[in-house]
Image (cartoon, grey):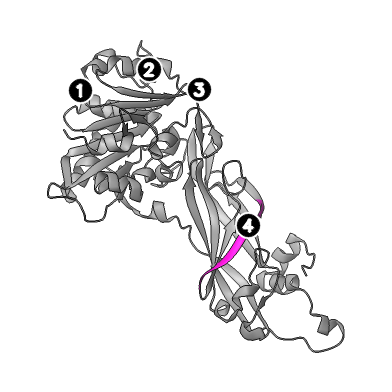
Amino acid sequence: MRTSITRRSVLVSGAAAGASALLGTPAAVAAGSAPSAPSARGDGLVTPVAEVLDGGEQVTSLRISSAALARAERSSLTASTFAVHVAATNPLTGEVAYEQDRVVTAAGWSRRDEVTLTLEHGWGIAGGGTLSYLGAYGRNVLLDLDYTITQVEPLQGAGGSGRVVIDSFRQGGLSDPEVDAFGHHATASGLNYRLFSPAPTAGAAGAALVVWLHGGGEGGLLTDGHDYYDNETQLRANRGALGFATPEAQAHFGGAYVLAPQSTSAWMLDGDRFAPLVMEAIEEVVATHRIDRRRIHVVGCSNGGYMSLKMVAEHPEVFATSTPICCGIGARDGSNTYFISDTELEAMTTPTWLVASADDTTLDPQANTVYAHERIDGSIMSLYDGVTWDGNTFPGHWSWIYVARNDPSHAGQSIWEWMATAKR
């Protein structure tokens, strides 16, 4: 039975004392008999496991590894065996973004000495996010996560031999298998990028290359004394790049590299400066991997939607396709820091598929996406009424969800199929 104890008591008394207290006092001890000693004690390594959902990355489970667990009776593990508490701190401001208990929805054995706790997660579920949005700067920041695990119910020893108690826990690094599949790199000029490499199944000409250009929130923050340039948020904020690394997308392309550069600020702030830096990253990857130069595709959302058009305008001979999502093209009088002119739009010959949602309140789809579509000869446009996926309704600006899920279709082809069959 769970014994009531305050969180402050657990933290002050230490993990070992906290675990013993919460496990309660056996009835035999209350009657004056000698307590039954645990058959196994040990320390536990806790690994937060995250997944990038349509609404961004969340910690969806915890893995607890301990040699002592190998001596536990598996059937004694339940969703209430361990309690989970988390505190998330913004590393730039030192402010606590959130602190709360997390609901364990299931518990199971992932191997002989390791259990997995599944945590409540999903769109609208608080306490799982790995990023915090700094509104003053328009940037996402990877949070410092501190998980406190407490064993609140006993695990029975195998064959009924006493109890198994995890006395203390130490936290390991954040694990996200999809994100971790992208290697960390930087160009000679210092532009960060992540790169997914496909299985070696490409034909003689080499594999395709998909260049993902992130939104404004995923760049670095190097102003006002900040030195934040993490090469992480461009993969964790949404599934834009990750979608192209899924087995489904890779099957369409017959294997494709996925390149995700990270702006030092925001693409829209200085497209003229960033365009050659992105091109340097592309050339570096092409020079060091078996890539078919006829099958280089550029895709971007929001800021990156603008930047995908900018790359095509600057390098019309490079890309097999261009997919600007919820893009910006700038005011027609050139008053913004970003601008794709009518002349540039009308000169584009790269096959282009624009995607947006009609209820986008961040970048007006009529003034940007529809306007560009009307001037890019032969372009395709998917203009949705709203952004709804898997029963959840998201902000209208988030139409990148549809591309990451291969939803747009035209003339019997999905957007991934259209990209995969295109060559320069």
- Label number found at residue 349: 1
Element type where label 1 sits in the image = loop
Residue that numbered label 3 is attached to: 359
| Real-space Cα separation, disc 4 to disc 2, in angstroms | 44 Å
Specify the amino acid type for callout 3. Asp
Most common SS among magenta residues: strand
Please tell me whether residue 156 is drawn above or below residue 278 in the rendered image: below
**Which of these two is toward me, 329 or 404?**
404
Residue 109, magenta (yes or no): yes
| Real-space Cα separation, disc 1 to disc 2, in angstroms | 17 Å
Residue 359, magenta (yes or no): no
Q: Quadrant of residue 40?
A: bottom right
| Real-space Cα separation, disc 3 to disc 2, in angstroms | 13 Å
Query: Which mark is in front, 1 or 4?
Result: 4
The answer to whether one can see residue 81 in this image is yes
N-terminal of the two: label 3 or label 1? 1
Say left or right for 95 vs 205. Answer: right
Few, some or many C-alpha atoms within 10 Å of disc 2 (few <14, some 14-19, many ≥20)?
some
The answer to whether one can see residue 336 in this image is no
Extreme residue in the bottom direction: 34
- Label number found at residue 192: none
Residue that numbered label 2 is attached to: 370
| Real-space Cα separation, disc 1 to disc 4, in angstroms | 52 Å
Specify the amino acid type for callout 1. Thr
| Real-space Cα separation, disc 3 to disc 1, in angstroms | 29 Å
**How far from the left and from the top, in percent, is residue 393?**
55, 33
N-terminal of the two: label 1 or label 2? 1
- Part of the protein shown in magenta: 100-111
